[in-house]
Amino acid sequence: MGAFTTMTSKGQLTIPKDIREQLGLAAGTRFYVTVRDGEVVALPKNKKLADLAGILGRPPNGKSLTIEEMNDAIGEAVAEDDRRIMREWSEGAG
């Protein structure tokens, strides 16, 4: 669903009521605004992280990870990425 709106001289847009209702937007909702492929994209930040729990369903292997296991996995991924960057940098410097 889409609708036309007009930008004011201050760069403000009014989001039509039916779209606000559909997305559950209220006054004071913050947006992340960016440009993607030449288009303005406004993403409302009206969700809390807790609201997203379970959004992806159960893990494929049926096993949930603890916070510590997630932190370890993130740390390993960052360390591997750092090793890759350093390796590529040293190969390019020679």
Image: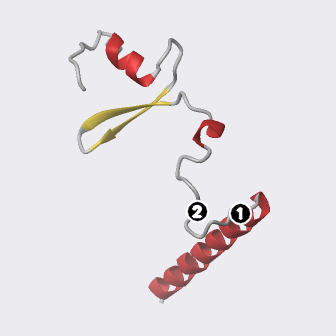
Please state which amino acid type lies under the numbered disc 1.
Answer: Leu
From the top left corner, tell me how far across and down residue 2 is, in percent.
23, 24
Q: Secondary structure at mark 2?
A: loop
Q: Sequence-wise, which precedes: disc 1 or disc 2?
A: 2
Residue displayed at 76% across by 58% down? 67
Q: Is residue 10 visible?
A: no
- In the picture as drawn, the residue positioned furthest to the right comes out as 68
Crowdedness near tag 2: few (<14), some (14–19) or many (≥20) residues, C-alpha within 10 Å = few
Give SS at disc 1. loop
- Measure how far apart labels 1 and 2 are at the Cα level: 9 Å
Q: Position of residue 13 (x, y in %)?
A: 33, 15
> Around disc 1, counting alpha carbons within 10 Å, would you say few (fewer than 14), some (14 to 19), or many (20 or more)?
few
The quarter in which the N terminus is drawn is: top left
Q: Is residue 87 visible?
A: yes
Amino acid bearing label 2: Pro
Residues at badges 1 and 2 in contact (C-beta under 8 Å)?
A: yes
In the rendered structure, the answer to whether residue 67 lies left or right of residue 83 reads right
Labelled disc at residue 65: 1
Q: Residue drawn 67% across and 73% down?
A: 76
| Residue situated in front as seen by the camera: 85 or 59 | 59
Q: Quadrant of residue 75?
A: bottom right
In the depicted view, which residue is nearer to us: 26 or 74?
26
Left or right of 84? Residue 70 is right
Write down the residue under mark 2: 59
**Which of labels 1 and 2 is toward the front?**
2
Residue 37 image position (x, y, % from top left): 25, 45
Using residue 90 as the reference point, say whether residue 64 is left or right of it.
right
Residue 11: mark = none
